[in-house]
């Protein structure tokens, strides 16, 4: 349990910690998390209940099937207990400040998993004010636990993350950000981002991940030409066009996105590639059912990996802490 100040009753205010952004993690830590995820995927009992006696708050203010189930189940499977909070459960809905809510949670919990459409800065504040490690299960800017799941899925099916070549097609959203932040840490990786004009990766993320990848002998390149598809890629990855909790100002955005959908004809242009999708899918928009459920799709292996990557992240963030 976290210690408190005996006089004020406050939890200690600490530097934000946990798993908040993949940009915070070293290549060694990212590699270890991916490998641990694969180990747990192959043997779910390969642990000694490292969260036994730990109580974790699971705060989800946005809809979720895979991520919420993965973290809630992962906590229980690792020997901990989970307290779930939905979108209307906390007093932040009635005007209490995030800092005051964080302090209260810090007095009673051992860690927090949170998914919102809010900012990464808010999550860092939550961690600092509570004195607890926080796992970012999705923020507006980045979905780092999805990124770890994606790295682990690639590792599972390929055996190495070095020199992998990935094509991401669709909006440069929080999933794309996490993918770029993650892959750019490994030797010789090449990430091609094929995004509609005006819907690409944020410029600062593109710049920093491209520089990091170049430092490891790889690349992160973004283009907007739907006809520009390198046939050498090993994985083709797409996500749904409408990210949870966001909206697009252009009323005709679906027409802008139409050329960026993955059907059997598109996938035929990358003859060796396996198909990834973080789900949920909107078949008929970003992908066809024939691709999603086709012989080259590993989207359901990726979905299964959500649990085991969540367990790896929980173990890393919460086990062995005072």
Image (cartoon, grey):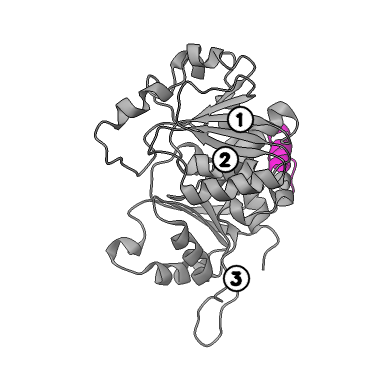
Q: Is 157 left or right of 177, judged from the image as shown?
A: right
Report the residue that reaches farthest toward the left.
251
Alpha carbon distance from label 1 to label 2: 10 Å
Q: Is residue 169 above or below residue 51?
A: above
Residue beneath label 1, please? 166
Q: Is residue 34 magenta?
A: yes
Instruction: Where is residue 157? Give x, y as percent.
Output: 69, 26
Residue at 55% x, 48% y is 207
Q: Decide which of tag 3 and tag 2 comes sooner along the chain.
A: 3
Residue at 43% x, 22% y is 261
Q: Is 179 left or right of 115, judged from the image as shown?
A: right
Alpha carbon distance from label 3 to label 1: 42 Å
Instruction: Where is residue 299? Give x, y as percent.
Output: 55, 26
Residue beneath label 3, please? 2
One can see residue 306 in this view:
yes
Residue beneath label 2, please? 179
One can see residue 44 in this view:
no
Q: Is residue 47 magenta?
A: yes
Residues marked 1 and 2 touching at CB (< 8 Å): yes
Residue at 64% x, 34% y is 190
Q: Nearer the viewer, residue 211 or 4?
A: 211
The local secondary structure at tag 1 comes to: strand
| Circle 2 residues within 10 Å: few <14, some 14–19, many ≥20 | many
| Circle 1 residues within 10 Å: few <14, some 14–19, many ≥20 | many
Instruction: Where is residue 158? Give x, y as percent.
Output: 72, 27
Residue at 67% x, 68% y is 322
| Disc nearest the viewer among 3 and 1 | 1
The local secondary structure at tag 3 comes to: loop
Q: Is residue 247 above or below residue 301?
A: below
Report the span colored magenta: 33-49
């Amino acid at each position: 349990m976290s210690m408190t100040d005996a006089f004020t009753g406050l939890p200690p205010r600490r530097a934000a910690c946990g798993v908040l952004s993949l940009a915070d993690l070293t290549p060694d830590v990212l590699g270890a998390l991916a490998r641990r995820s694969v180990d747990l995927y192959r043997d779910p009992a390969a642990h000694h209940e490292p969260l036994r006696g730990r109580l974790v708050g699971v705060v989800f203010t946005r809809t979720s099937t895979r991520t919420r189930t993965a973290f809630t189940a992962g906590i229980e499977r690792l020997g901990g207990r989970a307290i779930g909070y939905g979108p209307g459960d906390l007093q932040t809905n009635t005007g209490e400040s995030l800092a005051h809510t964080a302090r209260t949670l810090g007095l009673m919990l051992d860690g927090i998993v949170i998914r919102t459409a809010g900012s990464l800065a808010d999550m860092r504040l939550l961690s600092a004010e509570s004195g607890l490690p926080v796992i970012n299960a999705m923020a507006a800017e980045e979905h780092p636990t999805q990124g770890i799941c994606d790295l682990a899925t690639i590792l599972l099916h390929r055996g190495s993350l070095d020199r992998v070549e990935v094509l991401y097609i669709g909006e440069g959203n929080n999933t794309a950000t996490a993918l770029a932040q993650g892959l750019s840490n490994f030797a010789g990786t090449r990430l091609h981002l094929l995004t509609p004009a005006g819907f690409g990766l944020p410029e600062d993320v593109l710049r920093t991940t491209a520089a990091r990848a170049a430092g490891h002998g790889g690349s992160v390149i973004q283009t907007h030409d739907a006809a520009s598809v390198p046939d050498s890629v090993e994985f083709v990855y797409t996500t749904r066009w409408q990210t949870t909790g966001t909206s697009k100002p252009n009323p005709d955005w679906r027409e802008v996105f139409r050329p960026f959908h993955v059907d059997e004809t598109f996938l035929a242009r990358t003859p060796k590639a396996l198909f990834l999708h973080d789900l949920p899918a909107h078949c008929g928009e970003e992908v066809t059912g024939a691709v999603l459920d086709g012989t080259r799709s590993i989207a359901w292996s990726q979905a299964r990996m959500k649990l085991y990557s969540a367990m790896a992240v929980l173990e890393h963030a919460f086990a062995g802490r005072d």
